[in-house]
Image (spheres, rainbow, N blue to C red):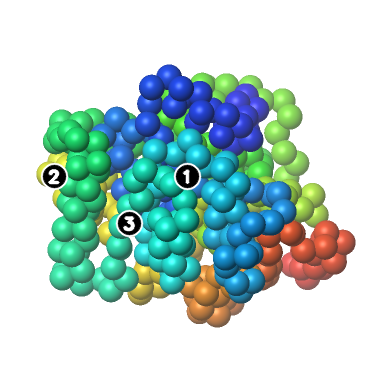
Amino acid sequence: MIEVFEDLVTNRHVNALRWKNSGRKIFGYFCSYVPEEIIHAAGIIPVRVMGGSDAITLADVHLPSYVCCFSRSCYDLGLKGVYNYLDGVVFSYTCDTMVSLYNIWRKDLETPYVGFVDPLCAKRETSRKYFREETARFRVSLEKFLGREISEDRLEKSIEIYNENRKLLKKVYELRKNSAPPLSGVEALSIVRSSMLAPKEEHSRLLENLLNEISERQDAPEPGLRILVSGSVIYDSEILKMIEDAGGLIVTDDLCTGTRYFWDMVNPKTSPLVAIADRYYERIPCPCNYPPEKRLEHIMNLVKDFKVEAVIFVLQKFCDPHLFDYPFMEDRLKEVEIPTLLIETEHVTSPIGPLKTRIEAFFETIQ
């Protein structure tokens, strides 16, 4: 039941090559601020570009060591030809590193289409207008590359397909509110990550099957301290497994590869391009967007709704946006007596022994 989602993650490159060999175009995207619906409406399969667990051997010649491991790992895989199957790749201005990576990728790699979407940080009406225009520019750029129009009807259909997938993911998360959730945090991460790596139509059918069968599950995870994990991209579940092995049960998250990816819907009752732009403009923000209060409100709502007992921040070393936001989030959570723990990760996970001891000691202070 869960294995099919894990397989989509593990064999993502094999699957993408299979879809490409069947005649489909494949686009990679680096950030959840990239409007996938437009790519999908163009008849292209969008897949999230993610790093890997293999040693970084080529990228460090081009990128300094103080660049986050996500960027270094993704670029390393690009240099090694792992992403040669991509017909296009789309970046977003979520930090200075991503802007630089866009320029380096465009210069050094031979991906046919390299695009860029710029979501503005400031929340004012001029910013909304700008992002609507930016979304329209992205559509035109794709149309020029493909040599065909992306129709309003196709945009509306893509909105419907993506909203359906988001609603199903939210239903899966609703099950985790139970006192004995049927899914572990590691499994939930695989489910959400797989939604970024497969055609949405196929993934939605898998989610429907999961929701129909999950009530009969006999091997549900053991109850534990109810944890919310906050951070950016988590593409390796080892750290989550460590948290759950130490006695925690991850019941929800504030992750770029979790709730922030699917929580908000596109309004189907407005002009499709405007609706898509507004959804990404108004969504639960990542730290690259301000003010941070909206994201804090999202976290506080999750803490309440999922009966969270502690929050663990899993942040990549040198991830400036998240590390800048962390003190603010920590202080606000302490004000409502929610314990927090900060774990900084590198490409090669910190030594397991000391990290496991830190997590266990943190849990002991709560229980």
- Report the residue at 38% width, 26% height from top: 24
User: Which residue is identified by label 3?
Assistant: 116
Q: Which residue is mark 1?
A: 48
Q: Give the label, 1 or 2, closer to the camera.
A: 1
- Within 10 Å of the Cα at label 2, are there few (<14), some (14-19), or many (20+) other Cα atoms? few
- Left/right of residue 110 with respect to residue 79 in the rendered view: left
- x then y, percent, for residue 7: 62, 29
Q: Quadrant of residue 356?
A: bottom right
List x then y, in percent, for residue 137.
19, 53
Element on which disc 2 rests: loop
Residue positioned 30% across, 57% down in the render: 117
Is 73 drawn above or below residue 6 in the view shown? below
Q: Earlier in the sequence, mark 3 or mark 1?
A: 1
Please indicate whether residue 31 sits to the left or right of residue 143 in the image.
Answer: right
Residue 236 can be seen, yes or no:
yes
What kind of residue is marked 1?
Arg
